[in-house]
């Protein structure tokens, strides 16, 4: 079964740090880009960051660039999001999602975000 | 960055109605657009990929169309379980962007 399982959320003070993990199973993890998406309470979905399969290029939303770092361990099929200098406005449910197949072509390039984790809640508050 | 403008932000409809939700991209995104449904307390569920491809297991009353900058999600005959919030997502280039969401209410 294709599955993503996040962990690492919790309560942290403003200015603090937290590291989220996303364990993948059921697909060839190293071949796929992976993304983090968040949803603040009562708000819409916001794409946060991505890391490609293959070359491992990284991408960030302006709202988190310079504070968050995405990484992956393909030997352990695990995605990470290191969150530093956390702000109250970073409070959200964080989801990991399966993104694009590396070196895709045609229809395979449209097969993104078909698999999501269950989400992990990050609360930034004093 | 590509901006996605989704409309309406909310709408009321009845069981059996035909409903259309639109997303407009600030620049061409080919067919790299997906639609998601989200119910309260749950994660998003993909309905449509590649602008018009129906996700396996999703009822055929859902359909998507469009290419370039203008896209549409249509529900042909609303069922009680369809009342939820819907989002579009452009994945043509990073940073990916979601539409603001459409809350579909009874």
Image (cartoon, coloured by chain):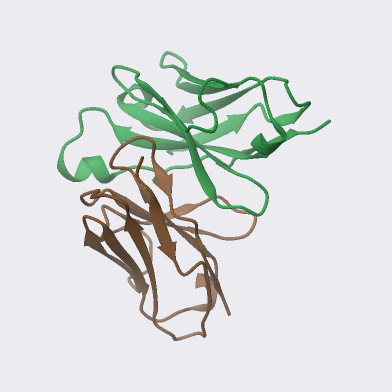
Depth check: give the residue in front, A15 or B55: A15
The location of residue B99, given as percent across then percent down, is 44, 54
At x 49%, y 23%, the residue is: A79
- Expressed as whole percent of the image width and height from the top left, the position of residue A48 reads 50, 34
- Residue A49 is left or right of residue B70, and the answer is right
Residue appearing at x 30%, y 37% in the figure? B93
**What residue occupies the far right of the structure in this picture?**
A126
Q: Residue at x 36, y 66 (%)?
A: B22
Q: Please give left or right for residue A102 compared with residue B104 in the image.
A: left
Q: Front-most of B4 and B90? A: B4
Q: Taking A104 as reference, is B15 left or right? A: right
In the rendered image of this protein, does residue B52 appear above or below residue A98? Answer: below
Residue B55 seen in the current view = no
Chain shown in green: A
The quadrant of the rendering that contains the N terminus of chain B is top left
Residue B17 image point, x, y percent: 43, 85
């Amino acid at each position: 079964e294709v599955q993503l399982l996040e962990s690492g959320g919790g309560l942290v003070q403003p200015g603090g740090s937290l590291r989220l993990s996303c364990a993948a199973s059921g697909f060839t993890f190293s071949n796929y880009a992976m993304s983090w998406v968040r949803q603040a309470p009562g708000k819409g979905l916001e794409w946060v960051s991505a890391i490609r399969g293959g070359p491992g290029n990284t991408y960030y939303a302006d709202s988190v660039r310079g504070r968050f770092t995405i990484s992956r361990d393909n030997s352990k099929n695990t995605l990470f999001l290191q969150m530093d200098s956390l702000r109250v406005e970073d409070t959200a449910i964080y989801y990991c999602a399966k993104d694009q197949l590396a070196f895709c072509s045609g229809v395979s390039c449209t097969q993104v975000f078909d698999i999501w984790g269950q989400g992990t809640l990050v609360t930034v508050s004093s | 960055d590509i901006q996605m403008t989704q409309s309406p932000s909310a709408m009321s409809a009845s069981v059996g109605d035909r409903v259309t939700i639109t997303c407009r991209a600030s620049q061409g995104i080919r067919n790299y657009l997906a639609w998601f449904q989200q119910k309260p307390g749950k994660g998003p569920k993909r309905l449509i990929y590649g602008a018009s491809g129906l996700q396996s297991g999703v009822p055929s009353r859902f359909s998507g169309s469009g290419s370039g900058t203008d896209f549409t999600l249509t529900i042909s005959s609303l069922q009680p379980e369809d009342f939820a919030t819907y989002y579009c997502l452009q994945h043509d280039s990073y940073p990916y962007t979601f539409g603001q969401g459409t809350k579909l209410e009874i």
